Image: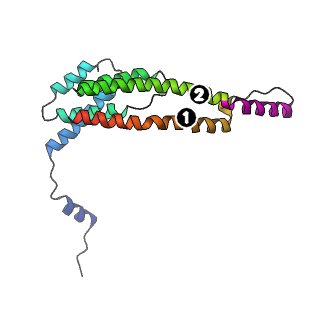
């Protein structure tokens, strides 16, 4: 009959060859620090400017600089997304400046400028879609208002955003619009990664 081992004995056997590697821990911590720096920069914290971010990279031990930059990059590149409205322009501009600080390639700057123009185009198209969807749905909404007014004996106004049928119709068309742009976003993220790794 074989020897029955406890879970603790099995765990010790599996980990006996694993030794604490201080340099791996330092690289992990540098990447985490990079993420904190990027988040502070995006949050607009006064002390975290582009200059401060580049100083943090320069002042890091040379063996950890790349990991620090990877942490910054991972946070910033994750922020490349379709804007919800004009208020996102400032965030998008900050992301671009942050990425330009760690990606020293004029190709990236040109690509990001095109992406900014694309986002502006997307916002315009989104406003146009919003207006067109509302106009297209207006007759149906009036019909529903008239029907409710007849049943209740008083004039009824329906907010389109309170009508589940309108919401479904609206979301279907807006999702199609977003789908047209999502592929470009993913491509831009991949290009940013390529520029970063060069």
Residue drawn at point x = 63 percent, y = 37 percent: 169
Q: Quadrant of the C terminus?
A: top left
| Label 2: which secondary element | helix
In percent of width and height, residue 19 lies at 15, 52
Dot label at residue 174 = 1
CB contact under 8 Å: marks 2 and 1: yes
Residue drawn at point x = 45 percent, y = 34 percent: 181
Colouring method of the image: rainbow
- Say whether residue 179 is magenta: no
Say few, some or many: other residues with alpha carbon within 10 Å of mark 1 (under 14 / 14 to 19 / 20 or more).
some
Task: Estimate the spatial distance between the alpha carbons at disc 2 and disc 1, rounded to whole Å.
Answer: 8 Å
Q: Which residue is mark 2?
A: 130
In this view, the residue in front, 61 or 90, is: 90
Q: Earlier in the sequence, mark 2 or mark 1?
A: 2
Residue drawn at point x = 28 percent, y = 32 percent: 73
User: What span is colored magenta in the figure?
Assistant: 136-153
- Say whether residue 148 is magenta: yes
């Amino acid at each position: 009959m074989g020897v029955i081992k406890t879970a603790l004995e099995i765990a010790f056997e599996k980990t006996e060859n694993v030794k604490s590697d201080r340099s791996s821990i330092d690289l992990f911590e540098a990447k985490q620090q990079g993420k904190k720096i990027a988040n502070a920069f995006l949050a607009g914290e006064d002390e975290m400017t582009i200059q401060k971010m580049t100083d943090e990279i320069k002042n890091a031990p040379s063996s950890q600089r790349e990991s620090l930059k990877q942490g910054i990059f991972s946070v910033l590149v994750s922020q490349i997304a379709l804007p919800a409205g004009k208020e996102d322009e400032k965030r998008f501009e900050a992301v671009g400046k942050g990425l330009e600080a760690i990606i020293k390639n004029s190709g990236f700057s040109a690509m990001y400028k095109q992406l900014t123009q694309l986002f502006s185009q997307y916002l315009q198209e989104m406003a146009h879609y919003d207006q067109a969807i509302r106009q297209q749905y207006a007759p149906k909404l009036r019909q529903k208002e008239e029907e409710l007014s007849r049943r209740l004996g008083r004039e009824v106004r329906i907010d389109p955003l309170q009508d589940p049928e309108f919401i479904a119709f609206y979301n279907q068309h807006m999702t199609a619009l977003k789908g047209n742009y999502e592929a470009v976003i993913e491509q831009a993220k991949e290009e940013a990664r390529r520029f970063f790794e060069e």
